[in-house]
Image: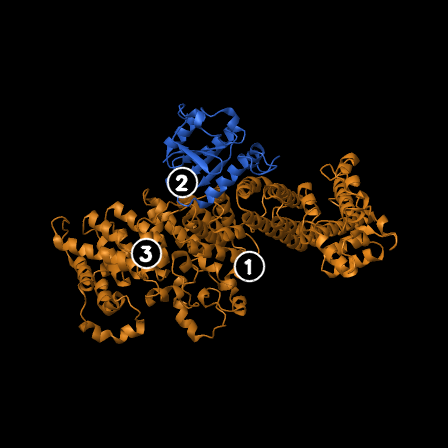
Chain colours: A blue, B orange
Amino acid sequence: NFCEFCLSNLSLSHLATSLPLPSERDHLRPRIDLIVFMIDIKSKYSLKNVETSLAYVDASFFLGKVCFLATGVGRLNSCSVETNVICKLGETYNSPVLFCELEVRLATAQRLLRILQICAGHIPGVSALSFVSLMRNSYDY
Amino acid sequence: MQRRRSSKTPKQPLHVFHKSQTDLSAWRKGGRINPEKSLQNNLSSNDQKYDSQESSLEQALSYLEKVQNPVALKKNTVLQKHLATVESTALQQGLPPEAFEILLSVVLSGKFVDTVNTRLLKSLIPTSVIPENSLVTAVSWLCASKCSSSIQLLFLRWLITVFDFIDHKEQLHALYGFFFSFLQDEKMCPYICHLLYLLTRKESGESHLCELETILFLILFGMQSYLQALLSLYKLFCPEQVTITLPGKMKTYFKNSEGPWKAAIAAVRQRNQGTSPLSQAVFLGTSQPQSRKRKWNAQLVIPASSTNTNNLEEDREKSSVESYSANESFPVEQLRTFPQLLQNIHCLEFPSQMGSVLTNPLLLHYMNCVKDESIYLRLYYWMGQMLQEECTWCVVDNPNEEEFKSFLNTVYKAECFLQEGLADCEEFLYRTLPLWDGVCCRSEVLRLVSWIPLSSVSDIKSYLYDPLAQLFYTSSIYFKCSVLETLKQLLQNWLNCNVIQMDSEFSSLNTTLSGLVNVVAELVHFVGRISTIALRLENNSTFLLYFILDFYETVCDMYLKYNLPLLILPPAGVFYPALLCMDSVNLNQLCYIMYRYRTNLVAAKENELSKKKILQFKFSNQTYQEYNQYITAMVGCLWTSSVFQKDIHPQGLRMDDELLSKTAVKELKTSFNIVYHPAMMGYSVHFLQQACPDDTTFNFRLIKGKKWDWYLEYLYAQGLEGLKVFIESSISRVSQAARSKAENMQM
């Protein structure tokens, strides 16, 4: 159930179950605008997987091109990863955390798409770094 | 009394069973037969042929009741058959009221093995009501402890789940002491606490608290959350007797005890929707007919059985407005008019289903004036549970989004009526907003947000602003507009509460004026920040700007309208996009807002100078300075065409002459004012066509002198009221002829 999106451009998105990505197709890989780490809050394993994969992400991505998507909030009763653990993760890596339920995902997909538009530089005057810092601490400048 | 009752039980069920035989059959047809009709059919129904299932439920019940020796399930096919019948009937249609006494006696007398008892208990799903008598019997069996402890626990969980289906509760209240004694049982204690919490009334709290020993015992038991809950209720009823301090709010007091029944009950109710006159009769009582079926909605209606029903009959004979004596309580379901409320206000008792208060304006009035904490506690407890269990984005299996919406709406209406937010709703929002996708029940949730009570800045920051801002930045423009609208409502609600508080001059609320000023200032700054960012994200959308300016329409009048010593100007990121916007509606609105800022600031200055009041707060010079900067920019932009030279705001429009000359605009000094402003261009073109019909070159320079005045008159006639009040107040015209020398008014 765990996967990681590497979305690039508006239409292209790639899925990988963990990092690092295989190196043989490196030359064919397009620019990566946003990495979305998906964490299933019902599975401790998925959190662990994300934590190990994070080590392979280049530091420059943490300047606004990473976000965490915690899935499965529709069944909070059966969650095994505490939400504040995920929030902590977001804080540590300076990246926003979104919560969603995969069974009702249209709204979340649209939200991700908006983040992607900004990260890919499609909104004039708003950079990925400034936006992500807004998303993280919205109130104290 | 217990023993006596138990000894009676063997006869009673039989009697009930026979008497109700025809009712049973009427019920089983599940049809649209009303009770009168089924009575008429009394005789003939005996002759009617039952289909196989019908007769076998009766047979099953009588078999279960009569079988004497405990029998093993495996070997006994007859028992298996009857058991299956009971189970399938229960799941499909629910069980009729008459079945409960029989089945509860069977289960709690321990005559079968536990597997059978468990299966029977699990199928105790009511079609309509559960007669109180059957529970009295059950409790007496419980006291006799003939069944195993696991069955006892399961029975208690069942009782808590179906509590609202019990037709009367008077006799159950009489058994309060028996339940209380079960507190000593370690395993049963959590469930007994929950049950007592549901049952406790003022009298029961008093009489049982007197036994201080028990409380000591409770304390020794360790402060479990369920004991705390019960104690806190007692403490409310008789604070002088509970001296220990209880920790603050807890999220959940009780374990979920609904077990396998809740879903089954819901399914049965859904299936029987509208078809069972019986089930409706219970919930409607004497109140207005409504077609509310599901759990919480059913609980929004005051049931006839909610209070002492014995009063009902007597009351019919009395005149309806007659007052009740002090020791007798007025049945709330008969409360219809405001005079009735006034007359009986000393002897009202809230219904056992607190949810019904939400839809009843009279009870809301009453709740508002009695200042009884326990009522709020009961309501919050019930509401908290409903919100938690039914929240459609936290419980994805819950398919009833529409019903949840209507419930949220009911809560919102009650809040509007009370003119205050309910604490439990706040907690619910704080807990679930970070998990919300911003789409599910959007308008309902946002309306509830507008009633979040004023509390500490840090709480609101981390629980409301943070999750809201995240959603705001990543959601559609429509969501952004709704959030702005909501925050305007929130601001107005806070300001209104403040006005009331100041008028009545009692500061019972623990907010000081400076506290209030801080919280409001934080909200205004928050909106300023998110608006600035939103305008950039949405490319200065006109639609969005409209909502932002709407918010500032409230902000600019806080001093005069709400008597709050606070004025905050919009940030440059809002002001300049509004000043340079492309449509006249927003420009007009900006002019109006700046005019109101001026009026407020002038009033504040006057108050300060005359020193009529000892001023605890005064506006800083920075506010005046900022206002003057904005006014300079506006006058330069709308009147003197000098904005590029004169604007001194650091984020303003000032440009070097060299840069300006590069634009190659001729006659720079007269080319950016009310005539050339992009938002006004439409008007000036139209005006030129009417004023100089011969001129086809659109020579805007023709609008000067007398024509300038005409142009102004024309603009005012077009409904640009904001522009009018702004020009008339902020631009002093030395003389009509020397109009171009207008200056901004210095404050």
| Labels 2 and 1 touching (C-beta < 8 A) | no
Q: Which residue is mark 3?
A: B267
Q: What's the mark number on residue A72?
A: 2
- Classed neighbour count for the residue bearing mark 1: other residues with Cα under 10 Å, few (<14), some (14–19), many (≥20): some
* Snapshot quadrant of residue B9: bottom left
**SS assignment at label 2:** loop
Viewer-side residue, A121 vs B411: A121
**SS assignment at label 3:** helix
Q: What's the mark number on residue B417?
A: 1
Residue at horizontal 52 percent and vertical 44 percent from the top? B475
- Give residue B38's position: percent from left, percent from top: 27, 72
Q: Chain of mark 3?
A: B
Viewer-side residue, B222 vs B675: B675
Examine the rendering and report whether any part of residue B371 can be seen: yes
User: What amino acid does circle 3 point to?
Assistant: Ala
- Give residue B722's position: percent from left, percent from top: 73, 55
Examine the rendering and report whether any part of residue B239 can be seen: no
Specify whether B332 is left or right of B581: left
User: What amino acid does circle 1 point to?
Assistant: Phe
User: What amino acid does circle 2 point to?
Assistant: Gly
- Give residue B602's position: percent from left, percent from top: 78, 50
Q: Quadrant of the N terminus of chain B?
A: bottom left
Residue at horizontal 55 percent and vertical 49 percent from the top? B478
Specify whether B228 is left or right of B668: left
Judged by depth in the image, the label closer to the viewer, 2 or 1, is 2
Residue at mark 1 to residue at mark 3: CA–CA distance: 33 Å
